[in-house]
Image (tube, rainbow, N blue to C red):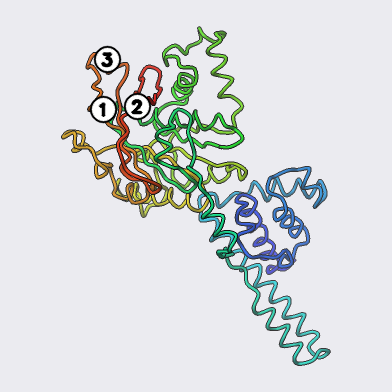
Amino acid sequence: MNDNNVKRYDNEFQFLSILSNDRRLVDKIKFSEDYFKSNLYKKFYRYLKNESKMDIERMLDYMTFKEAKDFVTKVYINNMYADSDKESMALGYAKLILEDYKKDELIKLGAVSGTISTNEYYSRLTEIVKLNCEIEIETLSKDMIDEMISDDSQGIVIDGFSILSLFLKLDITDLVTVAGTSGFGKSAFLLNLYKSLSQYKNLYKCHYFNLEVSPKIMIKRLLAITSDHKVDEFNKGIINDDFYIKARDKIQDNDSYIKSGSISIEELKSVTLNALDPNKINIVFVDHIGLLETEDRNFSRNEYDKVTHCMKELRNLALDNNLIIFVASQFDRASIKTNNISMSSLKSSGEIENSSTHVLLLKESKQRETPEDQKKYYQEVTIEIAKNRNGEVRELDNYTFLKTKQIFRES
């Protein structure tokens, strides 16, 4: 095999590797299996084009068992571009593959040029030259416009947060920032949302990135929220208790997941994209934005640049993949000191407000004062909807944060 063919097969291999790890690109990039030189890679592409999930049994309709094994062990797991712009990378390889195909077609056309008419020659030449593999642009059809206007959906309704859901009208591509000071339960608020949504396994897949506390603490908090018991009740002495077993069984064997530990925005995107379920609404939780790192040195010089970059990346992640993303944030110290909390109090970067479709501020209720000697047990909370792409902004003074159980109650 000459060097040119080695490079050509490698381009085809890398292209398929990206497509197999980001299936939405299969339909998004205008491409034909005819462009592949490798007959085996044509089979791989045909499989990706026709099937939405990785299924060994379905693969055998397209290829032999050995070929299917090669696809999974070599092409599929070769996820070199997990932290890169997959769309740009895939499109780049697609163009290289097409250029090689066009060269082959021009050679074939030249070989028969003496046996066909001039008109037919130039007609075939024009067809070859016009071949392209750009990103498919979806035009607005009559049916599409009618469907959008006819959609009177009130958005996602979250169990336990029906009033909040009514005003937020959450939908795919929304990015919701939840901000609060210490003790007002912004992390617990996100975990309550996760618990409510993840129980509907056929509708939602939740991807929770916990950057702040240990996995053990997260599981204890989730069990407490699920069982309506105190966090400190969960120890080895209750392994056989009914309330523990019921709570454990509700959160186990769940398609949704909680990933704990430090993480970069690049790794977060990779983990999320590889775990997406195309048949469900995918919801991402990030707790919190201040702890999210980046591997890009251009944006890691200071806190402002880092947070700005991470928020833009999260916004693009939601838009490009039809996700809903919840991000926890903090208030700046000056606002906390003066107790002057507003959207401008969001810590580190103005991009938090700019990239968010919704901003929720968790604040102390002024109408329902919490006695000082009870604040270690519970806190009366007002949720201010400070920004709302889908509806009105307002304050909702309907919430109590039960600190010992990590539960948010809407009244």
**Image quadrant of residue 124?**
bottom right
Report the residue at 48% width, 29% height from top.
159
Q: Which residue is mark 3?
A: 374
Q: Which residue is mark 1?
A: 365
Going from N to C along the chain, the mark reached first, 2 or 3, is 3
Between 386 and 132, the one lying in front of the other is: 386
**Image quadrant of residue 276?**
top right
The label nearer to you, 2 versus 3, is 2
Going from N to C along the chain, the mark reached first, 1 or 3, is 1
x and y, in percent, of residue 374 in the image: 27, 15
The amino acid pointed to by label 2 is Tyr
Going from N to C along the chain, the mark reached first, 1 or 2, is 1
x and y, in percent, of residue 103 in the image: 69, 77
Q: Is residue 22 above or below residue 181?
A: below
x and y, in percent, of residue 174 in the image: 44, 46
Mark 2 lies on a secondary structure that is: strand
Between 410 and 379, the one lying in front of the other is: 410
Report the residue at 52% width, 36% height from top.
206
Contact check, label 2 and label 3, Cβ < 8 Å: no
The Cα–Cα distance between marks 1 and 3, rounded to whole angstroms, is: 14 Å
Q: Can residue 141 be seen?
A: yes
The label nearer to you, 1 versus 3, is 1
Where residue 399 is drawn, which disc sits there?
2
The amino acid pointed to by label 3 is Gln
Mark 1 lies on a secondary structure that is: loop
